[in-house]
Image (cartoon, grey):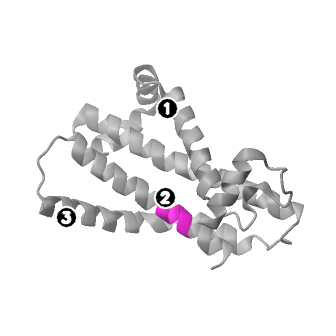
Amino acid sequence: MTRGTRRLLWIAAAFLLVSVATRIGLGLFAHGAFTAGEWLRALSVGLVFDLTVLPWFLLPWAVYEAVMPGFAPDGRARRWEQRWAALWAALYLVLFAATAAAEFAFWGEFGSRFDFIAVDYLVYTHEVVGNIMESYPVAWWMSGLAGAAILVVLVTWPGGRRGLSGAGGERGGRLAGWARVGALA
């Protein structure tokens, strides 16, 4: 399996896992007594929606992987490219997690997932963002999400056989060791 394929599969898995977890969490958060058939229907219809949206998230990665040249296995350019890609993977994961957190906040306020109300709020972006910043500790949430995303990427991102630490044996430190363990997965 190529480096690009592993990365695309990682992004797809991250998106699908966060989406399914969000759906299950909102179902539990709703305190409804759902039958097994209702859960199956909600998860399967949601999976169809997720698989429809997923290519739009993967398209920039596929273009990047198509135009990015292959670097020498022990070269400095390869290490920087791995770190650059891992940073973008963390940003994608933050986007997925922040959207999930926003869905829970929206559900708590309006009793539904993002819908026409959320789209209507885009017209009043300045006021809505101001209200959200006043009502919720957004900076703390985003910091926590970013920290968690970085740790997840360090452990699981497919950085090759040497992980994100590069060619140097001890140069990467403790987190780089975790990245090497994650590269084996």
With respect to residue 132, does 67 lie above or below?
Answer: below
With respect to residue 149, does 61 lie above or below?
Answer: below
Q: Contact (CB < 8 A) between labels 3 and 1? A: no
As helix, strand or loop, the secondary structure at mark 3 comes to helix
As helix, strand or loop, the secondary structure at mark 1 comes to helix
For disc 1, the marked residue is 141
Residue in the picture at 73% in, 72% down:
67
| Residue 9 shown left or right of residue 167 in the figure | left
Q: Nearer the viewer, residue 128 or 89?
A: 89
Residue at mark 3 to residue at mark 1: CA–CA distance: 31 Å
User: Which span is picked out in magenta?
Assistant: 9-14
Q: Amino acid at mark 3?
A: Arg
| Residue 65 shown left or right of residue 169 in the figure | left
Residue 74 at x, y = what percent? 87, 67
Residue in the picture at 71% in, 67% down:
160
The picture quadrant where one finds residue 80 is: bottom right
Residue 31 at x, y = what percent? 17, 40
Residue at mark 1 to residue at mark 2: CA–CA distance: 19 Å
For disc 2, the marked residue is 14
With respect to residue 2, does 85 lie above or below?
Answer: above
